[in-house]
Amino acid sequence: MSRVGYIAFNTFKETVRDKVLYNLVLFALLMIGSSYVLGRISVYQEVKIIKDLGLAAISVFGMVIAIFIGISLVSKEIEKRTLYSLLPKPISREQFIFGKYLGLCLTLLVNVAVMSTGFYLLLFMMGEPFESGLFKAIGFIYVKLMVLVGVAILFSTFTSPTLAGLFTGFIYVAGYYSSVLKNFDSIVESDFVPRVTAAAYYLLPNFKNFDVKAQAVAGAPLPLSQIAWATAYGLAYVALVLVASVWIFRGRNLK
Amino acid sequence: MKTQSTVIKVRDLTKDYDVGSFSRDKLRALDHLELAVEEGETFGLIGPNGAGKTTTLKLLMGLIYPTAGVATILGKPIGDLEMKSRIGYLPEQPYFYDYLTGRELLEYFGQLFGLGRSERRTRVDELLDKVGMTASGDVPLRKYSKGMTQRLGIAQALINEPKVVFFDEPMSGLDPMGRREMTLLIRELRDSGVTVFFCSHILPDVERLCDRVAILNRGKLVEMGPLDDILKVSIRTIEVEIDNLSEALAAELRGKAREIEKTGSRARIVFARQEDFDAAVGPLTSGGARLVSVTPVKQSLEEHFVAEVSGGEPK
């Protein structure tokens, strides 16, 4: 295994030994389970409600885990001075950032897998056949979480966990409504404002690209081109935020 | 004969810290430091709190960047991965991942040095034994005391069998037994040819262990050199023990000696200066007295250090 791999595996170990993570996953599974009760009281909508709530639970709890753990990954190492003994080892600062990022992605992969298993188990108990559309929707959620972890790490390289959490949360919300920014020129009569909002539109991650829950629940087909585009966009965004994180972290003095 | 080479070279190293987020003022923590450490040396960097010792080590470890100047370790620039694979570092008051056990931490660091599985396990067992932590190796680090963490810190600094080790306050948090073991460990490292660079404010330890020392004060180098040379220049007195000292000889010496203490035919004479002693030796021996012992009384490193540092501005 490479040094990045060892750092990633240690980060994974760090997160899975955190009790908070188990509480979050348990809560997500309870929420998926409770969708069964809600489904029972919704006439003719039983399965749809379970699918809607199940996918929403995976998305929301994945987001909470990504932000909650991601924002402190780097800053906690600086604050607790664990980096003082790690960085003099034969690793570069970029290997540290990539390792931390991959470790959290691995944690999220396991968590999403656990939540998805609970979700599919519930559908199986309802007598529903396996739907690849739902699986693809979960894949989209995972790519979104990968982007979010990248953003959280970026903020974690230069600010406190509290501020990093606020900023990442803001980016998450703004990323869902970034399309509003694109059409600002039709609302505001100004040359300058639409330019700024257009720049913000391209700078913010467009999380709508990963939101195919409604399509998947309705059973509408998800073309390969859409999957490929969203994945490529997500990975390109991750690459950008990681490069920015490395650039910031390389310049930091660890006082 | 093995030729020595310079393993740590520091030239003009300077570090300024920002005083506050909204202030343009800078605090100079290290001021144009120049030093060189030879292969196999045990080198001590001493100074009062805030002298710049830890800043020097952090700069050498690439944890902070210099405002000016350069440093090399084993001929490589700071941050070079090949160089990092040949050094070890114990930070001041180390803190490690508390979700790991001592053994897991050493295993993890061993992985980063590219040690193979069996080599790693052997090395981890050896090191845990060396620092007296075999019984606590599988205990999570959050349950470690300060002394145990310090011992593990020493072990992790040696996981790769380094050529150069940097210890920042290695005796900190250790009980007398631990300090003794650490002293023996540093001697063992020195005997095996490892270059040891350490910062400490426990001066008797530095005096016991170091070949050379550098004294820092307010970021500036005050003095540097072999310990014997530094303390030689500060011989305080020369104490001479004499047998068969006659009253006539004692009277002759009164002008030269600072103190004469006579007990029967024996006497203890204290000379304040080497010249006074040299001038007295001739008359003493020709006058029938017998020299029993001559002891130059040096300043301890602690006394020398206090004298250098309490002077305020460095030389």
Image: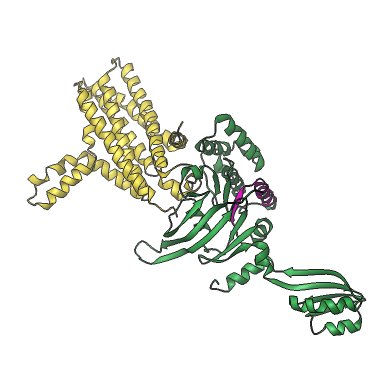
Chain colours: A yellow, B green
Along the line of sight, which residue is nearer the eye, B216 or A202? B216
Determine which quarter of the picture holds residue B255: bottom right
Along the line of sight, which residue is nearer the eye, B98 or A205? A205
Query: What count of labels does the image hold?
Result: 0
- As drawn, is B285 to the left or to the right of A204? right
Q: Residue at x 35, y 20 (%)?
A: A121
Relative vertical location of residue B250 with respect to residue A67 in this rendering, above or below = below
Does residue B181 show up magenta in the picture?
yes
Q: Residue at x 36, y 23 (%)?
A: A117
Q: Is residue A161 visible?
A: no
Relative vertical location of residue A119 with respect to residue B178 in this rendering, above or below = above
Which stretch did the figure color magenta?
A: B179-199
Q: Position of residue A142 (x, y in %)?
A: 31, 31
Q: Position of residue A67 (x, y in %)?
A: 34, 40
Q: Position of residue A146 (x, y in %)?
A: 32, 35
Determine which quarter of the picture holds residue B284: bottom right
Q: Position of residue B13 (x, y in %)?
A: 47, 60
Relative vertical location of residue B232 with respect to residue A79 in this rendering, above or below = below
Along the line of sight, which residue is nearer the eye, B4 or B252? B4
Relative vertical location of residue A128 with respect to residue B180 in this rendering, above or below = above
- As drawn, is A139 to the left or to the right of B54? left
Q: Is residue A90 visible?
A: yes
- As drawn, is B273 to the left or to the right of A164? right
Specify the quadrant that holds the C terminus of chain A. bottom left
Most distant residue in the front direction: B1
Does residue A161 show up magenta in the picture?
no
- By secondary structure, the bulk of the magenta-drawn segment is best described as helix
Q: Residue at x 43, y 62 (%)?
A: B16
Q: Residue at x 86, y 85 (%)?
A: B251
